Image (spheres, rainbow, N blue to C red):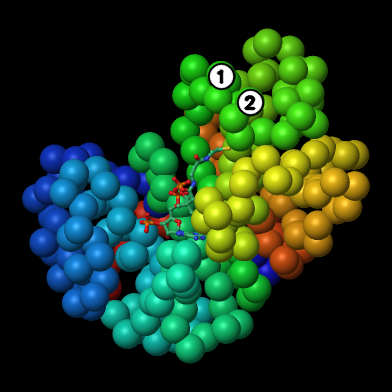
């Protein structure tokens, strides 16, 4: 089953005071990855992403969080070393870090809804998507734009190809109240689901499995410590 976990970032001032304590929980390589970020906000996102994955995977596999080994594909998709029946994916935006976990590859994308983004639709969306977007009331267009954006990103992320796959080489279409991925006239065999996280955010998940948890799980900072 596909499950989604979310952690809300903490106040930057509080984070700075506790940073070393959190970093000390990570194995050397993971610590190095996190420390490549110089901006505190980026460092916090990266660090809580590592802690969130480790906490969840540790619970599933019954191994200590520090002993979990994370490898990267040639396109940068993180995955569990030597474990091919448990998959995860991470995304961050604004004050959220989210992690999806499943038994087959999974992709997740969270985005903060920002006004003014609509104008870039033409660069990334297909004609079908633009037509669907324009058919919405003015008030709904921005939300639909971010529905499409996060759903498209989640599909890219399940494939793990990064931006080597053009965003306008496939369409997200809504048929009978269900989002699906379509290339030309063919539907792709993946499943999409959206979760509510907060009013000004969109969160989409794409998976090969079609069983999704009903709700996302919020994980508090104290539960990430180990
Ligand atoms: C890098 C990319 C995978 C996601 O980027 P993003 O949406 O900016 O960032 P997210 O926070 O959702 O995801 C980043 C995380 O995805 C994971 N990731 C990295 N490469 C990945 C890949 N090839 N496949 C899947 N996941 C990947 C990592 O955990 C990464 O976390 P990190 O930055 O802490 O290492 C890629 O799809 C990208 O650059 N997209 C550009 C966004 C864009 O222009 N979208 C147009 C909207 S229609």
In the rendered image of this protein, does residue 113 appear above or below residue 155?
Answer: above
* SS for callout 2: helix
Is residue 139 found left or right of 23 in the rendered image? right
CB-based contact (under 8 Å), mark 2 and mark 1 = yes
What residue did someone put label 1 on? 119
What label does residue 145 carry, if any? none
| Cβ of mark 1 under 8 A from ligand 1 | no
> In front: 105, or 49?
105
In the rendered image of this protein, does residue 123 appear above or below residue 91?
Answer: above
Residue shown at 81%/61% (left/top)? 189
> In front: 117, or 17?
117
Which percent across, then down, holds residue 94? 38, 37
| Cβ of mark 2 under 8 A from ligand 1 | no
Which percent across, then down, holds residue 79? 47, 73
Q: How crowded is mark 1: few (under 14 residues within 10 Å), some or many (20 or more)?
A: few
Is residue 145 found left or right of 189 in the rendered image? left
Which residue ends up furthest to the top in the rendered image?
Answer: 138
Residue shown at 65%/73% (left/top)? 104
> In front: 224, or 45?
45
What residue did someone put label 2 on? 122
Residue shown at 55%/54% (left/top)? 164
In the rendered image of this protein, does residue 25 appear above or below residue 212?
Answer: below
* SS for callout 1: helix
Distance between the Cα atoms at labels 2 and 1?
7 Å
Q: Can residue 18 be seen in this view?
A: yes
Which percent across, then down, holds residue 183? 80, 49
Task: Give the quadrant of residue 161.
Answer: bottom right
On-image quarter of the N terminus: bottom right
On-image quarter of the C terminus: bottom left
């Amino acid at each position: 089953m596909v499950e989604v976990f979310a952690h809300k970032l903490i106040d930057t001032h509080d984070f700075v005071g506790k940073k070393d304590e959190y970093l000390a929980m990570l194995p050397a390589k993971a610590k190095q990855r996190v420390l490549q970020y110089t901006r505190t906000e980026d460092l916090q996102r990266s660090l809580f992403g590592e802690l969130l994955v480790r906490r969840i995977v540790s619970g599933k596999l019954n191994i200590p969080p520090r002993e979990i080994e994370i490898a990267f594909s040639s396109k940068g998709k993180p995955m569990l070393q030597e474990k091919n029946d448990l998959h995860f994916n991470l995304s961050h935006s604004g004050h959220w870090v989210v992690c999806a976990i499943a038994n087959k590859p999974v992709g997740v994308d969270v985005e903060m809804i920002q006004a003014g983004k609509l104008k870039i639709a033409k660069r990334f969306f297909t004609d079908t998507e633009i037509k669907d977007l324009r058919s919405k009331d003015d008030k709904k267009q921005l939300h639909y734009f971010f529905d499409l954006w996060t759903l498209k990103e989640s599909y890219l992320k399940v494939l793990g190809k990064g931006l080597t796959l053009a965003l306008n080489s496939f369409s997200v279409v809504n048929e009978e109240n269900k989002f699906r991925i379509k290339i030309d006239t063919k539907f792709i065999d993946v499943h999409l689901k959206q979760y509510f996280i907060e009013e000004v955010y969109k969160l989409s998940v794409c998976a090969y499995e079609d069983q999704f948890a009903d709700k996302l799980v919020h994980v508090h900072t104290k539960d990430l410590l180990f």
